[in-house]
Image (spheres, rainbow, N blue to C red):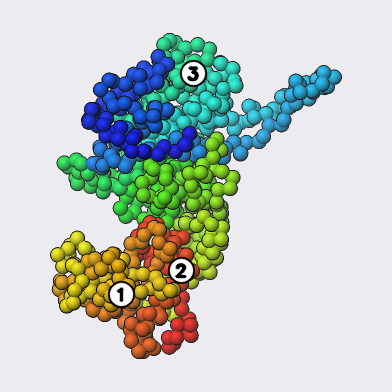
Amino acid sequence: MGCTIMTSETSGWYARLDHECPERTQQIGIWLDSWLEATKKGLPIAATLPNNWPTLPAGLLSNPGTVLDHLIARFDAQSDGRSPRGVYAPPARFVDAILYDELRHGSSKKKEPPATLSLAALPPSFRGFAKQINENIDDSGDSESDSPEMDNRTISGIPIPFADPCVGGGLLVERILRIHAERISGNTLNERREDTLRLLEGLQLVDSSEVAVTSARKRIVIVLARLGLVDLDGEGDEGKIGLSEAEMIIESNVRCVDPLLGEWPWNEGPMLLVSRPPWLRIKDRFRGHPDGSALRKRLSCQLREFQESDGKTRFSAIKGNVNLYRLYIERSMQLCQKGGRARLVVPSSVLREKSSLPLRKLLVESNQWDSVWSFPEDHKLLFGGSQGVSVIGVTVGEETDVLTSFGPLQIDDLSSGKGLVSDAPFFELERGPWSSWTDASWAVPKMPRSPIDRTRTLSAIGKLADKPRLVEDGTGLNPSTKVIKVRVGEVERSSWEDEICEWREGLLPFVRGSHIHFENGKGVIRHPAFDTNNVGDLEANSSGWSGPKNMAVQSRIACQAVVNPNSERRLVWAVIPEGCVIGNSVSFLDLPPVVTERLKDRFGTIEEGLRVLASQLNSEDLDLWSKAWAANNNVNNYEIETLPFEIEGGEFGLPA
């Protein structure tokens, strides 16, 4: 099954559905009822939908679960006050790759059973001898079925308890049930029934939404019936579970609970937890609610102050503008058994952003963070929007020695029935060098796909990692004790909209990030005040300042703060002449007086000294470093502050 691509035909269907049936909970309920009826009658779901519903396009006929996931994603977005447009669930192929990879991860730890000889493949004269060999092997107690490691696995190889603290409409559990059914298809009817019961009893599925929980319960029943494992019309038989028994188990093991602030309903922790938690900042929660501001403040306070029965704060990794997915990662580590596994689908920003540092420390220093898949912003997975997508794999309570980082990945790197294809790009981060590279912040570098470019990037990281950071004091650049600071331009465009205008003589130059270019190995300012021949429409637009004259400043060394992800370079440093006004799409270095005085003494003018400094900051190695550790498309101030930068007096030409 390929990744679902939302064509104009299918997206148009949802728009027409909203017109015919505007209530989203009603959409979900009708879809589930029609899916159940279609399953009972052996019909396609299109035949059981209400007559007033729009005709289903071919792209939505094949898998009713995909439509359910999208309907619930739209409902969740609307409940939060977000736009339902552009909101999608992970495609089934993506989820299958995660599950198959994780099941392979677990099975690789088991001792492989000795091979037995097939009697049918041997000549008659050897069959008696081979039978004796097979009996000896079967009696040895080394077979997989006798392994104590099978106590927490179904015959189909699913670790139990299996948990999802954000079950949503049940996408993950549907895919795990399909893998289960595929793996037990060769077993006896009774074995299939008993192993399915064991799996259902080992589920631990929760969600804070009643709509999601109700949907997941119905979906599980429907999927089991379609797989031939539940009898919708009776009490079951040797190979099928009766409907009432299945519903009773499912109702008990799919519950409406707040996994962040509530108590886990089961005494035994999960052995495997797989989830796609919500990617939602607390500040974006309750946007459509009339009391949204008060509700957001209360939720933030509850999460920061929530204590366990022993008095310890539940969430230790809360920092900055909290995104809920980070709390779900930490909560998952708490819920799993020691030695249990967690796989979580999260934004790639968690790998490098400063506010996720406490969480990464938790993953590395208290658990075994052993794998991460990284899909860049142009991944075409649809559900991640403009954000990169990552899948982290953690063994809870064990020690991190090596992290294997796969990426940048593409859709074609997903392998049917295996996880990732064998030639998917990866590299290994050993704990010692990794700590040195990142000052123990455990950020995961963003690698290019080309082997040549990967080698260049790793080489640059190796050369720069031990150098002092740009804002450190007591260095060749800044021998004083007053640190260099990184700031953004003073003018925020929406606040000064009336003062920013088209360029004309008599105005002060207004410099934006789009005015900074990298040409012939140097950073240059393309602005109509300084260059009338090589300025395009983008640079000429909104490049004049008619506001207060005192907003103009002395010469500065600056770089663009917002980067086009398709740009060849990430960092471009240039000197902004004296007398300009700078917008907040530009970051600049606020240099201590001792540094500016030394530049002036050595080079005659501050501007000339800044040009020499800019040429050093525009080095290829620093640009590769910046790309590797970038958290997003913005060049954050902390990213500039932590640039490794060291200039020897002779190399820079400054007096000692």
| Residue ID for mark 1 | 533
Q: Is residue 630 above or below residue 90?
A: below
Give me the disc on residue 228.
3
Structural distance between the alpha carbons of marks 3 and 1:
73 Å
Sequence order check, earlier mark of 3 and 1: 3
The answer to whether any part of residue 366 appears in the image is no
User: Mark 2 vs mark 1: which is more N-terminal?
Assistant: 1
Please name whichever residue, 140 or 572, is drawn nearer the observer in this view of the structure: 572
For the point 41% across and 37% down, which residue is it?
Answer: 4
Distance between the alpha carbons at the discs numbered 2 and 3: 59 Å
Q: In this view of the protein, which residue sits in the foreground, 133 or 82?
A: 82
Q: Is residue 590 above or below residue 18?
A: below
Q: Quadrant of residue 561?
A: bottom left
> Earlier along the polypeptide chain: callout 2 or callout 3?
3
Tags 2 and 3 touching, CB below 8 Å: no
Q: Which mark is on residue 69?
A: none
Q: Nearer the viewer, residue 137 or 14?
A: 14
Element on which disc 2 rests = helix
Disc 2 to disc 1, C-alpha distance? 31 Å
Percent of width and height locating residue 222: 41, 21
Identity of the residue drawn at 40% across and 64% down:
570
Q: CB under 8 Å between callouts 2 and 1?
A: no
Q: Amino acid at mark 1?
A: Asn
Foreground mark, 3 or 1, reads: 1
Q: Could you tell me residue 116's position as x and y percent? A: 73, 27
Label 3: how many residues lie within 10 Å, few (<14), some (14-19) or many (20+)?
some
From the image, tell me which residue sits under label 2. 622
- Three-letter code, disc 2: Leu
